[in-house]
Image (cartoon, grey):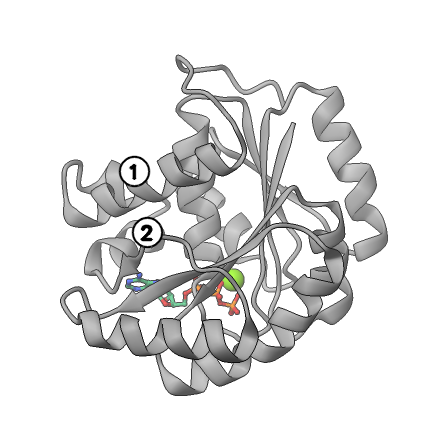
């Protein structure tokens, strides 16, 4: 089983957007599950709007429960587990980081967001797990914005950056607001392509091979 924690102490960075999209992409190939550890329950709300189905979203209310939820997921045959974490919640984020194989840190390529990544960077580094910043919701055609943001991250926070960016696109917003993913809402769209590229890269990080659709066992 491969576990990906999506962590950022900054609110609104795109954690849930990233988590539901990667869980949905993973579910097309593997038995996948999304653990919602955020009391705001946004991922669970998304699943409710979706009418359930894959990827299954399971609530996890306390850091002390997370290891047990992961053990149960493994027992039931989950192959890929995404953990969506809350903002401003050190204990849950630390526990998710500790139990994950890979950590993704969504971050808007904007000064305030970049400055706020320091707390997340410290938390993630102390876990010793592979972690990458994923730029999210920046302008689609602004290489200088990304160059400057990458410089801040590499020089100040020493975190590697994922080579795939999710741009600010209405499809992400509209899709999640209707319980779908961008590829489900608008196949072939730029948003769909970005998610496909991000999932392909993520899969490589986990040394996961592409598989034919699997049935959810959880
Ligand atoms: N790439 C994007 N393009 C357009 N809208 C986006 C994008 N990413 C996120 N959003 C929108 O920004 C808002 C915040 O995103 P999201 O809920 O994923 O952030 P979060 O980090 O999970 O927030 P919280 O810290 O409150 O849990 C949502 O309305 C979402 O639809
Ligand atoms: Mg969220």
144 over 49 or under it: above or below: below
Q: Which circle marks residue 28 in the picture? A: none
Q: Looking at the image, tell me whether mark 1 or mark 2 is earlier in sequence order.
A: 2
The answer, for residue 61, to whether it is visible in the render is no
Residue beneath the point at 62% across and 64% down? 86
Dot 2 crowding, Cα within 10 Å, few <14, some 14–19, many 20+ = some
Q: Which residue is mark 1?
A: 196
142 over 2 or under it: above or below: below
Marks 1,2: beta carbons within 8 A? no
Residue 174, horizontal then vertical, whole percent: 26, 55
84 over 25 or under it: above or below: below
**Quadrant in the picture for residue 217:** top right
Dot 1 crowding, Cα within 10 Å, few <14, some 14–19, many 20+ = some
Q: Which residue is mark 2?
A: 164
Image quadrant where one finds the C terminus: top right
Residue beneath the point at 25% across and 76% down? 145
Please state the quadrant of the image where ligand 1 appears.
bottom left
Residue beneath the point at 17% across and 64% down? 140
Residue 207, horizontal then vertical, whole percent: 52, 28
Q: Is residue 61 left or right of residue 41?
A: right
- Furthest residue toward right: 64
Q: Secondary structure at mark 2?
A: loop
Q: Does the beta carbon at disc 2 come under 8 Å from ligand 1? A: no
Q: Is residue 108 left or right of residue 189?
A: right
The answer, for residue 139, to whether it is visible in the render is yes
Q: CA distance from mark 1 to mark 2?
A: 10 Å
Residue 210, horizontal then vertical, whole percent: 41, 20
Residue beneath the point at 43% across and 63% down? 14
Residue 167, horizontal then vertical, whole percent: 25, 61
Q: Nearer the viewer, mark 1 or mark 2?
A: 2
């Amino acid at each position: 089983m491969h576990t990906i924690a999506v962590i950022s102490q900054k609110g609104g960075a795109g954690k849930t957007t990233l988590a539901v999209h990667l869980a949905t992409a993973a579910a097309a190939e593997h038995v996948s599950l999304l653990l919602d550890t955020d009391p705001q329950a946004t991922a669970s709300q998304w699943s409710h709007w979706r009418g359930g189905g894959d990827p299954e979203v399971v609530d996890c209310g306390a850091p002390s429960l997370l290891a047990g939820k992961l053990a149960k997921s493994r027992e039931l045959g989950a192959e890929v587990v995404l953990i969506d974490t809350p903002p401003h919640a050190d204990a849950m984020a630390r526990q998710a980081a500790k139990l994950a194989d890979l950590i993704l840190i969504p971050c808007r390529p904007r000064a305030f967001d970049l400055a706020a990544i320091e707390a997340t960077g410290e938390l993630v580094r102390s876990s010793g797990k592979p972690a990458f910043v994923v730029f999210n919701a920046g302008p689609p055609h602004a290489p200088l914005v990304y160059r400057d943001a990458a410089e801040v991250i590499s020089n100040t926070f020493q975190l590697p950056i994922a080579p795939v960016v999710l741009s600010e696109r209405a499809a992400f917003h509209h899709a999640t607001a209707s319980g779908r993913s961008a590829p489900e809402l608008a196949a072939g769209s730029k948003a769909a392509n970005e998610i496909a590229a991000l999932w392909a890269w993520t899969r490589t990080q986990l040394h996961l091979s592409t598989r034919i659709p699997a049935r959810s066992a959880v």
